[in-house]
Image (spheres, helix red, strand yellow):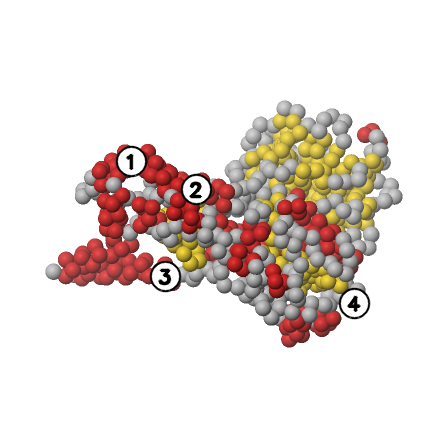
């Protein structure tokens, strides 16, 4: 009797839980850039200032390939007060999904305050707001911060607009190139030569995690190349290491207290830690093959590097103490310059096959290899601080100009980074403070 | 002993099923229409600062806060903004916004609603789904014959008969073609994130209640909102915001067949972002 009662109870429950509820899986949506309306910022005290602020933000968001600023001519509502809810329908009808309204207010101490409100014109609500008080001369950087704020609010990942890129500025004929270290904002503004007038050429610059130092390879005519560290604030540069042979391909560990380098012994080269203050090398690989280009994971537990120990040069991964070395790429051609993503999930690399160069990404276990771009020469991949974009240099044809480019992780939005001279070996800074 | 085990098992099952029924009702709802109240950590000076900004948006009153803060290296200091003022604001001292505010209010609110209504009365959208029904009729009929011993093909094709069945939960489900219509609309409404790590697991379930004219009744509810909040995953949170926006943007859902309203009066849309590969 009890059994019947319980069965009846269960029978009563089951239909209640399985009453048809229509579920529709939405796995494909719109992947085109999201339309965003960015009217000029209000700046009653100085005509044109607000327009410049809006232009910087708009340019940042547009170059990411994830946002499409709506043409200003289409705007219906004239925003006159950013603190009053806008007429959402006016923005919906011109195709905008979100509206960015802002103003610049002068402060008594000479600084300016940049106020921004981000509106969801579909959901009829304010998404978020932010304000920056900034020295007037720093307004461009504050505008980058606003763009970062919008980007992170709408995509979930941190922005990268308030960051810088250091690269090798190349001048002179191909046979007698002058290579200098140049730093610029990620959008190409404020290019500044850091190593002007030095008696050596510079290669493979890399930022320290705190963005205060850059390590690079100094290339001399009369002696082996050496690893240097350059302090951006003081301008001081110093040679690192006591090793008599050549050290190269330096890169800071995520902690910033040590460098990972390759060092050469005759025709062989291995990977080692290089302690900047003592200059001591701590060897990690002892393989008779050529091990080069170490790059550490953001967690600091593993190192990716390139090695020809298996015949052709391929990508390998090992633990931070040098143990557990294993190959992760097996494709045709050769693989080089692995760079671990700051997000931790991917390793970027360069691949050469049949006289073409490719830049690609692969999961850290070797699965899911994907090529993003190709040319006669593409080299030196470097990740944006949020792990979303790769910058690199590209030579379209033999002897052609070398330029900097960037591409989205998805293989979309290939674009050239503006530089005043030919440029190679870009290195993206960490996000600034 | 065996009997006791069985009883215990049944009791546990009962509790389990009870939990399944109750669970959806204890998830929190997303507030969309009510004004947003951003959380700000403010010192007393900052509150005074913000209030002054609201009263008179000149720079003078904003100067109290800086000395309390450690100036960042780049000299750029982040401050928070006050809540925006709603559009209908009669006591607004500025003359310009006042005349504008009453105007847009009636424009915006009724705009989305009246539009679908006349369309619905004219009923062109109804005809389309009916055609789709005809196309899918054979499949439906066969399916219902298999699944439902009380059903008959004629009933499946007959709206009235269908309605009776729907009330019993016995048939008249949306066809694949009809759900594909929703998916097709979402190709434009859903701004899908791409390049997202672990994308397959960042599912967002949005439940919407629909009126017969296809408009959304109340606010969309994110069924797994709690899990999204607890995870702290910013990609999941961004996907949630985009999913809600998509559900609203795609309204009205008036192209779904009227005779199957009992099926789509409540829809659960399950959104996922795109991964890296």
Quarter of the image with the C terminus of chain A is bottom right
Closer mark to the observer between disc 3 and disc 1: 1
**Residue picked out by circle 4:** A109
**Residue picked out by circle 1:** B137
Tally of numbered discs: 4
Q: Tag on residue B25?
A: 3
Q: Is residue B68 above or below residue A381?
A: below
**Residue picked out by circle 2:** B183
Side of B120 where A426 appears, left or right? right
Q: Residue at x 78, y 52 (%)?
A: A232
Closer mark to the observer between disc 2 and disc 1: 1
Q: Chain of mark 2?
A: B
Number of other residues with Cα within 10 Å of mark 2, as a class: few under 14, some 14 to 19, many 20 or more: many
Q: Give the secondary structure at mark 1.
A: helix
Q: Residue at x 46, y 47 (%)?
A: B250
Side of B155 where A415 appears, left or right? right
Give whichever of A68, B112 is nearer the camera: B112
């Amino acid at each position: 009797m009890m059994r019947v009662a319980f069965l009846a109870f269960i029978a009563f429950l089951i239909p209640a839980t399985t009453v048809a509820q229509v579920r529709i899986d939405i796995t494909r949506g719109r992947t085109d850039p999201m339309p965003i309306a960015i009217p000029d910022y209000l700046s009653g005290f100085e005509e044109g200032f607000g327009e410049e602020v809006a232009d910087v933000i708009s340019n940042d968001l547009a170059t990411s390939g994830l946002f499409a600023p709506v043409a200003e001519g289409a705007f219906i509502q004239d925003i006159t007060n950013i603190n009053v809810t806008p007429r959402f329908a006016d923005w919906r009808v011109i195709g905008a999904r979100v509206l960015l309204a802002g103003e610049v207010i002068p402060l008594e101490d000479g600084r300016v305050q940049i106020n921004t409100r981000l509106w969801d014109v579909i959901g009829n609500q304010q998404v978020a707001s932010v304000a920056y008080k900034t020295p007037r001369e720093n307004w461009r950087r504050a505008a980058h911060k606003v763009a970062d704020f919008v980007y992170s609010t709408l995509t979930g990942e941190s922005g990268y607009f308030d960051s810088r890129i250091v690269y090798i500025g190349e001048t002179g004929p191909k046979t007698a190139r002058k290579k200098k270290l140049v730093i610029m904002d990620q959008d190409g503004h404020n290019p500044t030569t850091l190593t002007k007038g030095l008696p050596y050429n510079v290669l493979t610059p890399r930022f320290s995690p705190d963005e205060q130092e850059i390590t690079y390879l100094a290339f001399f005519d009369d002696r082996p190349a050496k690893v240097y560290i350059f302090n951006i604030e003081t301008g001081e540069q110093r040679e690192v290491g006591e090793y008599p042979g050549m050290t190269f391909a330096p890169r800071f560990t995520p902690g910033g207290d040590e460098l990972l380098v390759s060092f050469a012994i005759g025709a062989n080269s291995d990977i080692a830690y290089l302690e900047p203050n003592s200059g001591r090398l701590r060897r990690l690989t002892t393989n008779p093959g050529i091990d080069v280009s170490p790059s550490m994971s953001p967690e600091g537990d593993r190192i990716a590097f390139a090695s020809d120990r298996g015949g052709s040069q391929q990508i390998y991964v090992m633990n931070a103490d040098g143990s557990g070395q294993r190959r992760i790429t097996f494709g045709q051609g050769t693989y080089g310059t692995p760079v671990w993503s700051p997000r931790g999930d991917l390793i970027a690399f360069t691949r050469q096959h049949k006289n073409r160069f490719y830049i690609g990404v692969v999961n850290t276990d070797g699965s899911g290899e994907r090529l993003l771009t190709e040319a006669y020469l593409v080299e030196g991949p470097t990740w944006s601080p949020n792990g979303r974009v790769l910058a690199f240099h590209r030579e379209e044809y033999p002897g052609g100009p070398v330029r900097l480019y960037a591409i989205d992780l998805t293989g979309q939005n290939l674009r050239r980074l503006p530089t005043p001279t030919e440029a190679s070996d870009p290195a993206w800074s960490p996000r600034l403070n | 002993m065996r009997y006791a085990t069985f009883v215990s098992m049944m009791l546990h099952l009962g509790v389990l099923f009870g939990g399944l029924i109750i669970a959806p009702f204890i998830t929190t709802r997303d507030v969309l229409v009510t004004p947003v109240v951003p959380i700000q950590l403010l010192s007393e000076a900052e509150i005074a600062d913000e209030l002054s900004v609201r009263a008179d948006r000149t720079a003078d009153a904003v100067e109290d806060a800086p000395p309390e803060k450690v100036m960042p290296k780049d000299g750029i200091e982040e401050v928070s903004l006050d809540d925006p003022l709603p559009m209908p604001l009669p006591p607004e001292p500025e003359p310009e916004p006042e005349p504008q505010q009453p105007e847009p209010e009636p424009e915006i609110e009724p705009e989305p609603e009246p539009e679908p209504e006349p369309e619905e009365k004219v009923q062109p959208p109804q005809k389309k789904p009916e055609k789709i029904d005809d196309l899918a009729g054979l499949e439906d009929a066969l399916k219902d014959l298999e699944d439902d011993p009380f059903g008959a093909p004629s009933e499946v094709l007959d709206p009235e008969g269908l309605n009776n069945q729907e009330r019993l939960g016995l048939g008249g489900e949306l066809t694949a073609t009809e759900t594909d219509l929703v998916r097709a609309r979402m190709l434009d409404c859903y701004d899908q994130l791409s390049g997202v790590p672990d994308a397959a697991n960042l599912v967002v379930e949005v439940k919407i209640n629909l009126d017969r004219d296809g408009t959304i009744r109340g606010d969309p509810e994110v069924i797994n909102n709690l899990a999204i909040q607890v995870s702290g995953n910013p990609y999941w949170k961004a996907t949630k915001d985009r999913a809600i926006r998509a559900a609203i943007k795609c309204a009205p859902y008036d192209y779904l067949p009227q005779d199957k309203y009992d099926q789509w009066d409540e829809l659960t849309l399950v959104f996922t972002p795109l991964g890296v590969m």
